[in-house]
Amino acid sequence: MHLEEEDFSYSGEALIARPNNPSSISDDEWGDYLFMRKNPKGRHVEQWQHSSGCRKFFVIERNTIDNTIYSSYTMIQASKEIKHETN
Amino acid sequence: MRRINPVLPSAIINNAIEIDFIFEGQQFKGFDGDTLASALSANDVKVFGYSYKYSRPRGIIAPYAEEPNALVSLEQGGLYTPNAKATQVELYQDLIASAPTLNPNSIEKIKPLFKAFHRFMAAGFYYKTFMRPQKLWMLYEKVLRSFAGISKAPVDFDSEHYDHMHHNCDVLVIGGGLAGLTAAIEIAKTEKSVILLDERPSLGGTTYDYPDEAVGSTNQLEYMNNIISQLDTYPNVEILSRTTAFAFHDENNVIANEMRQDHKPLSERNANLSRQRLHKIKAGHVLLATGASERPIAFDNNDLPGIMLSTAGLSLLNRFSVLAGEQVVIFTNNDSGHTAANYFAKYSQKVTLIDTRSNSPDVALNGNVRLINSSVIIKANGKNSVSSVTIGERDQKSNKNVLTETIDADLVLVAGGFNPVVHLDCHTGSNPIWDDNLVAFAPNLSKQKRSGTGALTGYIYATDVINNAKEQANNIINNSITATTAQKNFLNTDKFFNVESFGGKQFIDMQNDVTTSDIQLAIRENYKSIEHIKRYTALGFGTDQGKTSNVLGVAIAAQSQNLKMSEVGTTTFRPAYTPVTFGALAGQHINDLFDPERYTPMQPSHINNGAIFETVGQWMRPWYFPNNGDGLDGAVFNECLKTRESLGVIDASTLGKIEIHGPDSREFLNRVYTNSWTKLAVGSCRYGLMLDENGMIMDDGVTACLSDDHFIMTTTTGGAAKVYQWLENWLQTEWPELEVYLSSVTDHFSTTAVVGPNSRELMLSICSDIDFSKEAFPFMTWRAGTVCGVSARVMRISFSGELAYEINVQSNYGRFVWDSVLEKGNKWSIVQYGTESMHVLRAEKGYIIAGQDTDGSVSPIDADLSWVVSKSKQFSFLGERSLSRSDTSRVDRKQLVGILTEDPSEVLSEGAQILNSNTNSNMLGHVTSSYFSPTLNRSIAMGLVRDGLRRKGEKIIVATAKGKRSPSTIESYVFFDPDGLKMNGNESENVDG
């Protein structure tokens, strides 16, 4: 079964962890968290929401060139199974 | 030209059914099965229009969708269709067609004007000539457009309707020619679901044009008819004819448009059926069988009517039984010219075959054909159509031609080789590859779950096509896709694209009048990349998208620069393959179905009470209530004054409402709002400011504490969906440890807000179980009770500075409560007001509207809302860290101020620029809100001004786009009742924030 893409909404690069103690980090570090994204041409781990459906956020790995979707994860799976690479 | 009688067995026309139609005001007759082009050709019409730059006569040159010249307009009024290709228009009884450039008046006007310019009208002419003075460009453009050789844009609303359909299938076959049909039936046998699309009315592709070609003991036409009747027996196959796959998107999503009624007489069109249907198909595998289209060879005067592609001549002959000429000259660089010569030798008086090649291998030639090898057509001669051609012998080494003879001709067929129809394959970003074997750009086909067959991949002859289609079908069945283009030379094509010019014009792109010398000029002027050449000369810009001209243009660019074809490459093919009307793309998403409209339960009352509505997001909200024919200004004046004097009421049901439940609700609110929620008591409300992580104001609203673990949050009307998603995002992705549940309850409760000094009196008259005394029910609290007999939550909050109560009831009772309040309120001359008065009342008090006075770059400090920002919360709330970033914490940011004009009657434009009054320049900021205040009897405005908080009293100039300068002063943004005395209505009371 296929669901229409219109049912989903994109919500940016996945696994951007919010710093635990924002007041203790520098402006540069906070700026990295706010603004710096990989924006790759190719495989990209990103967050989506099933916004016209169950409202769950989830993670997929998608090719930004041709939209091939390699895998999808619940948020919990994603946090355990995808190793987060720092920028 | 003449219709061959009896009709050829391969023809799809039925001469028992005559069809009357009108072209350019003249009556004609054709037959059932004709296209407009074939019927007109049978009537000896050769000129279909005049070209747009040089106004040269033009006729049809192509068999189908590639046609650049014969553009026609169909019907009138709501049925008007611009720029149809006569080669694709199916004839129907009483069809009315006109050719946009055939109108004799317009031609007479154009001709003398453009004659004078002819020798200057090379590529880039428009850019160079009409760009200066720039002010006149609009005039130039208007005049030029009327000469542009294409139909006028429709002016009437499209009276027909359209719909969309979604499909899933295992295999999508695009193209219903021999290849597509053969593959489809092989796959159908495996019970996979198959959809086959074909743009023409009858399946079979070009088999009708080459009916004699043998397949085993039969011919390809019979073979093909046999497959079609077999296909009908497979329930797993869906065939869509008259359906053009015009876009191929990622993941095998193909969009196709089906012409459902365009071919029917107007009187037989069913108003209950859509005219066209857009099919959105998601396919497991896509097999492209889109065929190949013929390209011309350029020679001088190659645009004369009567000169056409050999496929166009064969289509007229074998498909429509129309003989386009008696004295036929065929100019070829490959074997297909020989095939064409054999067909024409059966019917025409004289057939001459000019072949660029020195010997012609594969096809046996009819004895009546005169073959001239190693020769070219140097130029065509004739006035309104071709009458003869001048032939030259080709010197293979020097590429010079020696003039040999002139041959009379009323039909010239050009066979310049075939271009695989690679367009769809390119839509997803794979570029075609120049193949020296094929002498053509071959499809890349490198994407997953996609393959090609038939002429697209270099197979032309029926036996080869069938074998290849079966092989590709089996590859799909066995899931073993392999490389696909034919390895042998495609029709022994000579790599020959254009004849050396003898000083005449050689047309490459006939729709845009682009010549060989235009392309050479572009290169001399350093527009060398094919993408630049395209844009400088307009090569391939027309409604035909250069289907006949592209490869020729590439070839000339390659020759001129001594490059290989592969080094020049092609321009990018993008959707749509052929033009699609906007109606089909919109489908049913028009008018009322364009976007949902949301109504509050009070809507019927608002309509009865004469409200004028405005849309806020998807909501229809009363904008104002024009009493006694008052316009906006009069109504707002009345609504504002009466509310401040006595009593007003507004429907506030559209505000977003989110229920927050769970033991961690307070902690959650602490994290998403700037202020503290730890101690908010049950029964109290608090204003909250929500920031994004950049520290900028995102939304605001009041949240009430219903019980220790249960809150109800309100958001702005327009921000509700975004806020809800924002909250869900943090809960699900970052803070799963919080036990908090969110529900959107915007539609579940309706809100009647009663506002003004008499609102307490009104509440007392409709609710007896709540103590409305100032001590028992202070500002920023809520109480449960029964209002007008309905269970309600009453909140004492205010967006006007007046004493006010918001009555929240279950939505079913919303209209009843609203109507009851209006009736009871008569005693205090109650006035209902809309969003405009709400804006004025709040601006008088200096309350911001998030999204109007803020724009995503305004921090709480900028908006002078520091009092809402807690400095002592343990968790770093969203956006807090950003407030101390160097840019956010600098003092000269744009800040919220009030603005008063010197002239109190002048209302500034929202968005107007604010300038330093000393320099009359130096932009300081802009106006965000501006109204005439009835209460203050003068204009008021708010704005964002650099370092504004420190500029109070400073003179500024407000500039509008039209050059007006309004001297003004920066003031406090609280224009009315700065001490908040009115908050308690008629009782005096200390304000408890």
Image: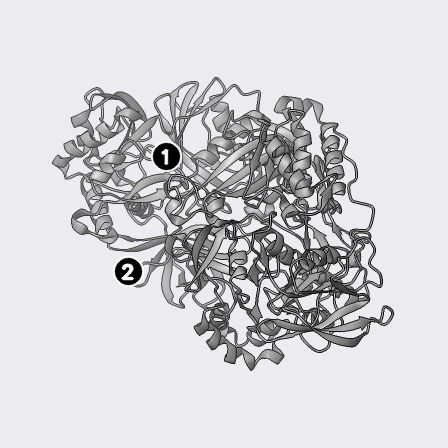
x, y percent for residue B121: 61, 76
Q: Position of residue A38 (x, y in %)?
A: 69, 40
Comes first in the chain, label 1 or label 2: 1
Q: Residues within 10 Å of mark 1 (few under 14, many from 20)?
A: many
Q: Residue at x 57, y 22 (%)?
A: B736
> Could you tell whether B21 is left or right of B564 in the image?
left
Give x and y (percent) for residue B663.
Answer: 48, 17
Amino acid at dot 1:
Leu
Residue at the image point whose x is 39% and y is 41% from the top: B270
Q: Which mark is residue B904?
A: 2
| Amino acid tagged 2 | Pro
Question: Split into 4 quadrants, where in the image is the N terminus of chain B?
Answer: bottom right
| Side of B974 where B345 appears, left or right | right
Q: Is residue B454 left or right of residue B779?
A: right
* Mark 1: secondary structure: loop
Please state the horizontal and vertical placement of residue A49, each as a whole percent of the image. Answer: 56, 30
Image point (67%, 41%), residue name: B178
Mark 1 → mark 2, Cα distance in angstroms:
33 Å
**The one of B709 and B264 positioned closer to us in this rendering:** B264
Q: Nearer the viewer, residue B211 or B50?
A: B211
Judging from the image, mark 1 belongs to the subunit labelled B
Kindly indicate the quadrant of the structure image that contains residue A64.
top right
Q: In the rendering, which numbered label is found on residue B655?
A: 1
Residue extending furthest toward the left: B827
Name which residue lies at 64% across and 35% down: B227
